[in-house]
Amino acid sequence: MTGPLLETRNVTKHFPLSRSLTQFFGGEARLAIHAVDGVSVQVAAGETLGLIGESGSGKTTLGWLMARLHSATSGEVLFEGQDVSQLSGAPLRRWRQNLQVVFQDPVGSLDPRQRVWQIVSEPIQAQHNFSKAKLRTLVAELLPTVGLPPDCLDQYPHEFSGGGRQRLSLARALSLKPKLVVLDEPTSALDVAVQAQILNRLVSLQREFGFSYVLITHNVAAVRFVADRVAVMYLGKVAEVGPVRDVLEHPVHPYTKALLAAVPVADTRRRRTRYKISGEVPTLIRPPPGCRFAARCPFVIDRCRVEEPLLLPLVGASNHVVACHRAAEVADVAPESLLVTVPPPTTAAA
Ligand SMILES: Nc1ncnc2c1ncn2[C@@H]1O[C@H](COP(=O)(O)OP(=O)(O)OP(=O)(O)O)[C@@H](O)[C@H]1O
Ligand SMILES: [Mg+2]
């Protein structure tokens, strides 16, 4: 196969508002939240694509579109060249085997009444009619690959730490050796040492089995460590995509520059952030025409407010693409000029 393993083509997800909310916002036709708006990204076989962006930028919605957990409002999701919305019956079951999702919250995504062998073998049971003994053997073999002991088959999720539960989710997702795993903030609920162990494990499993990952995260260090390429999302659109080193070391889009400079620590709950991006985030119900970052961008020109910038390659770098009318002019601008300082927190609770 020469094309990408997974590709979204101009994919869009709008969540319609209720009639009463539509009226509240003064809408006549039914209004919708434009969570993902015309996103085209590709994931190659064996590659990790990082997906970063502020809260609400559409990362999870895009991950769910990729996994067909949401149906697209328009556009396509192709897996090995095939439109996944067209799959049904046996081809759909085969495809499900190849794309798994690991969710942020291992507590919510694991059934507390099920034992480890049942939880981890769930995808296998959906595909095969194996005996209980065979399922237990398979799970016992799988557990050490995610760093869990093989003798915990009969334990329940509550008997594990947060990191242990996330390893169970990972074992479940990997149980059928999928081609692609969408990891939605897989380590953000865990402490830093456990995060590192799990990220290491993801990397070594990828080397061994050739998995592709889509890693959705706020943790730029995790992206640097795990991902090959990174896509930066802002208000339902991709602002910049490229090889990790290029995007993280030489961000070009003013939003990427600001985002990277404003999040110096992985754990946003600690509120150590010294900077924030100035300006208000526009609403996703009536997204502005033109560039969605225009209202917050110090480099804005009239054109940005009316003409949507396309994702275009930078001169001399065909795989680093940026959606900014002024990409060439702002490429070398220091990110601090895009930020305002936030006073340090006053309570010890931080
Ligand atoms: N099922 C839904 N119904 C209505 N609106 C939704 C739904 N899911 C997401 N949204 C909205 O779509 C937008 C994008 O949400 P999404 O969860 O994809 O963002 P995100 O980038 O994953 O954010 P975070 O970093 O906080 O996880 C948000 O405005 C959110 O409120
Ligand atoms: Mg999310």
Image (spheres, rainbow, N blue to C red):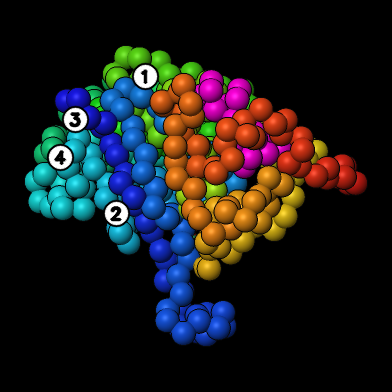
Q: Which mark is residue 317?
A: none
110 lies above or below 174: below
Instruction: Give the SS element for disc 4.
Output: helix
Nearer mark to the viewer, of 2 and 4: 2
Q: Earlier in the sequence, mark 3 or mark 4?
A: 4
C-alpha distance separating marks 1 and 3: 25 Å
Q: Which mark is residue 75?
A: 2
Looking at the rendered structure, the kind of residue marked 2 is: Gly
Q: Earlier in the sequence, mark 4 or mark 1?
A: 4
Give the residue number, with chain letter if any, for mark 3: 133
Name the quadrant of the N terminus. Answer: top left
For the residues bearing labels 4 and 1, Cβ distance under 8 angstroms: no
Give the residue number, with chain letter if any, for mark 1: 205
For the residues bearing labels 3 and 4, Cβ distance under 8 angstroms: no
> In terms of secondary structure, what is the magenta stretch mainly?
helix
Name the quadrant of the C terminus. Answer: top right
Question: Which residue in the rendered view is the most extreme toward the left?
Answer: 90
Looking at the rendered structure, the kind of residue marked 3 is: Ala
Q: Position of residue 146 (x, y in %)?
A: 40, 23
For the residues bearing labels 2 and 4, Cβ distance under 8 angstroms: no
Residue drawn at the location 49% of the way across and 29% of the way down: 314
* Magenta stretch contains residue 52: no
146 lies above or below 340: above
* Magenta stretch contains residue 249: yes
Q: Earlier in the sequence, mark 2 or mark 4?
A: 2
Label 1 neighbour load within 10 Å: few <14, some 14-19, many 20+: some
Please state the extent of the stretch shown in magenta in the rendering. 242-265
Instruction: Give the SS element for disc 3.
Output: helix
Instruction: Give the SS element for disc 1.
Output: helix
Give the residue number, with chain letter if any, for mark 4: 94
